[in-house]
Amino acid sequence: MSTVTSFSRRQALLGLGTAAAVPLAARPAQAAGRVVVGTWGGDYARLLTKNIEDPILKPRGWEVVQDQASDAPRRAKMLAERRLPRGTVDIQGLSAANIHEVGEAGAAEEIDYSKLSNAANIIPAMRYKYGIGHIFSGKVVLYNPGMVDRPAGFAAALDPRHGNKIGFIDIQYQFVMVAAALAAGGSVSNIEPGKEVLLAAKRAGARLYPTNEAFAQAMQTQEIAIGMMWKARGVQWQNAGIPLQMVAPVEGVPMYVSGFAIQKNAPNKAGAYAYMDAMLEKSAQEAFAVDMGFNPTVTNAVVPPELHARIGFTPEETARLVDLDYAYLARENAAMKDWWDKVFKA
């Protein structure tokens, strides 16, 4: 990834909340129909229903069906269906890295931004060729202040001296490996230096949890005291009473963007665009900031200052936001997963 691209994205994020709102264009009438949405389950699926589907799409006559599964099987299905005249899903919820992957593989539609009424307000860093960012946060260090000292960043969080108080999340192997690389002097385009850091933590007794929820439970019971997670999730867990504080790492804050891509052979592309349009609406974006702790991806969404102080980043922290190298991750993902499963987890 070029320096120019990274800088422009950081500058776009720095402008969050300060850009003048552009009046919404008159919304054209939408034809009612059925739209199938591929998404993760859990809280995210529930909040899609609460903040997008029920209040915005259903009153306009759209029937929404959620196809819930983790991202890997949904991506595999997209790739398996790409040569069919019609796929089985219209729009897929994916990370920005996975949006890039399915787009380059020929399974996602190139976005026509003229079909979106709030397109002018999308943060430039969240506009992709094959998809759009819905919400974003950054990877931070979570720690229990009653059990460990405040760490400066990833290197301190991965220090073997913490022993079995370090926790990792299995499904976040890509981001864990990126964080370890930054801790070891690598980069988002070179994860090799981080492998020994992870193995050292494992040898010291670090624990591995299958899901975000299992990691949260371990933080709650104080089985572990330190780990890495999206800042948004940390806010949710603080709200739930889990004893933790957060640090924006000195090495850089890898961005996490959750967004949507339209399947190239979607049976209802009009429905896919209607869904994408609804998820960009000011009301929906503001509701996700409140309910989920993620930052909006449109500049006309208003986040109260006290909430932004919790879920957002200071100007100094924003300058440390690191955009991922999506092409690198797409190219190296299979090898990363192979190392994670066969070496780190062995």
Image (cartoon, rainbow, N blue to C red):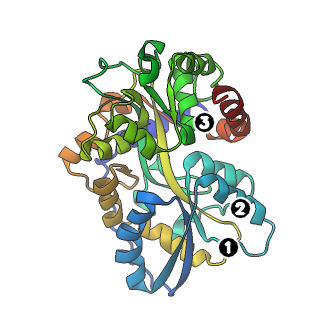
Q: Is residue 38 above or below residue 103?
A: below
Q: Is residue 148 above or below residue 324?
A: above
In the image, what residue occupies the spot 49% across and 67% down? 276
Which amino acid is tagged 1?
Answer: Thr
**Front label number (2 vs 3):** 2
For the question of whether residue 6 can be seen, the reply is: yes
State yes or no: discs 2 and 1 in contact (Cβ < 8 Å): yes
In the image, what residue occupies the spot 38% across and 56% down? 298
User: What is the quadrant of the C terminus in the image?
Assistant: top right
Badge 3 density bin: few <14, some 14–19, many ≥20, Cα 10 Å? some
Which amino acid is tagged 2?
Answer: Lys
Pointer 2: what residue? 77
In the image, what residue occupies the spot 69% across and 26% down? 343
Q: Is residue 275 above or below residue 325?
A: below
> Spatial distance from mark 2 to mark 1, Cα to Cα?
9 Å
Pointer 1: what residue? 88
For the question of whether residue 3 can be seen, the reply is: no
Which amino acid is tagged 3?
Answer: Asp
First in sequence: mark 1 or mark 3? 1
Image coords of residue 60 (percent x, y): 41, 84
First in sequence: mark 2 or mark 3? 2
Picture quarter containing residue 198? top right
Image coords of residue 324 (percent x, y): 56, 36
> Spatial distance from mark 1 to mark 3, Cα to Cα?
30 Å
Pointer 3: what residue? 325
SS at badge 1: loop
